[in-house]
Image (spheres, rainbow, N blue to C red):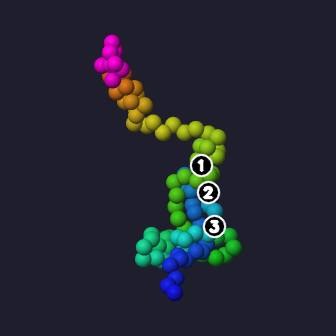
């Protein structure tokens, strides 16, 4: 019988925006033909062992839902562009349906 299950082992995830790391288990621990495979980077953990590390941009340490702090994401004026576009459509539709 062919073993189709991916390798499951310890991996460190590192939140680059919050400087937060945590050790867990993941299928990213092993090399697979069908998947992304083992991360190339590694990190030495506090237990003295070296584990593969996966960098993520957001985790529970930096996500606004978990931290309770909102971030301003609209750096390109997207909200204002939407309002201008929406105002154009509402002015075109005045007086009729």
At x 64%, y 40%, the residue is 68
Residue name at image x 49 percent, y 71 percent: 39
Q: Nearer the viewer, residue 35 or 40?
A: 35
What label sits on residue 62 in the rendered view?
A: 1
Rounded to the nearest angstrom, the CA distance separating label 3 from label 1 is: 18 Å
On the rendered structure, is 67 left or right of 74? right
Q: Position of residue 44 (x, y in %)?
A: 61, 72
Residue identified by numbered label 2: 20
How far apart marks 2 and 1 lie (CA) works out to 9 Å
Residue 1 % position (x, y): 52, 87
Q: Residue 17, image x and y in percent? A: 55, 52
* Depth order, front residue of 86/56: 86
Q: Which residues are magenta?
A: 89-97
Residue 44 appears left or right of 54: right
- The earlier-in-sequence mark between 2 and 1 is 2
Q: Nearer the viewer, mark 3 or mark 1?
A: 3
State the residue at coordinates (62%, 51%): 61
Task: Identify the residue position indicated by label 3 in the image.
Answer: 24
Residue 97, compared with residue 42, is above or below; it is: above
| Residue 70 location, quadrant | top right
Marks 2 & 1, CB-CB < 8 Å contact:
yes
**Is residue 9 found inside the magenta-colored segment of the image?**
no
Count neighbours of disc 2 (C-alpha within 10 A) and say few if under 14, some if 14 to 19, many if 20 or more. Answer: some
Q: CA distance from mark 3 to mark 2?
A: 13 Å
Task: Identify the image quadrant of residue 94.
Answer: top left
- Residue 7's disc is none
Local secondary structure at mark 3: strand
Badge count: 3
């Amino acid at each position: 019988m062919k073993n189709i299950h991916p390798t499951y082992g310890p991996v460190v995830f590192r939140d680059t925006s919050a400087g937060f790391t945590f050790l867990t288990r993941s299928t990213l621990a092993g090399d697979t033909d069908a998947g992304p495979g083992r991360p190339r980077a590694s990190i030495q953990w506090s237990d003295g062992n070296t584990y593969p590390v996966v960098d993520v941009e957001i985790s529970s340490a930096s996500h606004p839902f978990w931290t309770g702090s909102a971030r301003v994401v609209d750096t390109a004026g997207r909200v204002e562009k939407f309002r201008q576009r929406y105002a154009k459509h509402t002015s075109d539709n005045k007086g009729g349906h």
